Image: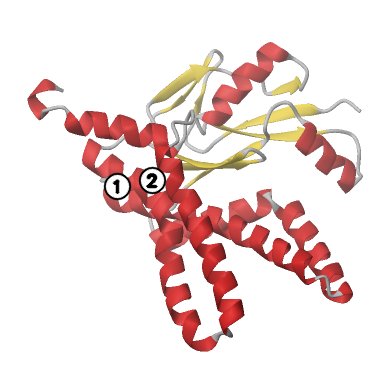
Amino acid sequence: MAAELRIEPAANVIVGPEHWTHPDLGIRIAAPPPVTDARDLEARDRIQIALDHGLASARVTSRTKCDVMRWWLYWSSPVSPSRAVPLAGSPARAMLQVAVQMTRAWLPFLIFCLGVAAIAGLLSAWPLLAFVALSVLVYASLIVHECGHTVAYILCTTSTFKGVFVVGRSGARLVRRRLPPARDTMVTCAGPFAPSIISIPIIWGGIYVLPLNLWVMIAVSLTSISLGHIITLVIPSKGGDGTALRKALRELAVPRGDI
């Protein structure tokens, strides 16, 4: 069944016949087509650029009314459908936006985990239940990771525009202006270290109220997840925290007069 990608400009984007401009982010790109067949390679590339820069939201549309089929079209689309949401100026409201948008994007996964957990509980399949719980913990840690970036950027920037949060099938990210190197380093590191900051009091407090075997399981799980996030700072992935940190540190190492 053929599906179409419907493109909608994000808030504050100036839409022109040939270019789309986001004055707050300082980005100008070639205008993507408003609706296109998902198999159109040239249009897909222009759409993906708009989505990656937080200038547009994209959703898969089709004539089917079946929710299962819509989910299939969403996950099988060559372009990652996503939403671009301008963030509020308050850290608390911005964190709520991040949590809501990530939950909406991954709702099928959470429903699936809930169903598997119910079946595992009925069958007393405790290893499977533990695996589902670990999957949900990893998902929650991703929300904490993005909240770390978001809160740090809101506190470090002097601009009234607090960035755009982009979330979709392929993940989530904060699209923002670059800051001076020292502050940019803080924003980059805040995400990977946020799960550790949350995990430490949970592990420390849990030893007094939880059975030892359960506490060990939780402590090992949270420690492993937290270390996994910190490791992203040393992985030079395209568009990842490791690449952003290297760039900020190189700028920080250059004497101010040489910049």
Which residue is tagged 1? 186
- CA–CA distance in space, label 2 to label 1: 16 Å
Residue 79 is situated, as x and y percent measured from the top left of the image, at 69, 27
Pick the front one: 51 or 194: 194
Secondary structure under tag 2 reads loop
- The mark that comes first in sequence, 2 or 1, is 2
Q: Residue at x 40, y 41 (%)?
A: 233
Secondary structure under tag 1 reads helix
Task: Please name the amino acid that badge 1 sits on.
Answer: Met
The quadrant of the rendering that contains the C terminus is top left
The quadrant of the rendering that contains the N terminus is top right
Residue 171 is situated, as x and y percent measured from the top left of the image, at 60, 41
User: Residue 214 sits in which quadrant?
Assistant: bottom right
Q: Is residue 122 left or right of residue 195?
A: right
Pick the front one: 6 or 254: 254
Indicate whether 191 appears above or below 214: above
Residue 54 is situated, as x and y percent measured from the top left of the image, at 51, 34
Tag of residue 3: none
Pick the front one: 235 or 166: 235
Tag of residue 162: 2
User: Residue 250 sits in which quadrant?
Assistant: top left
Task: Please name the amino acid that badge 2 sits on.
Answer: Lys
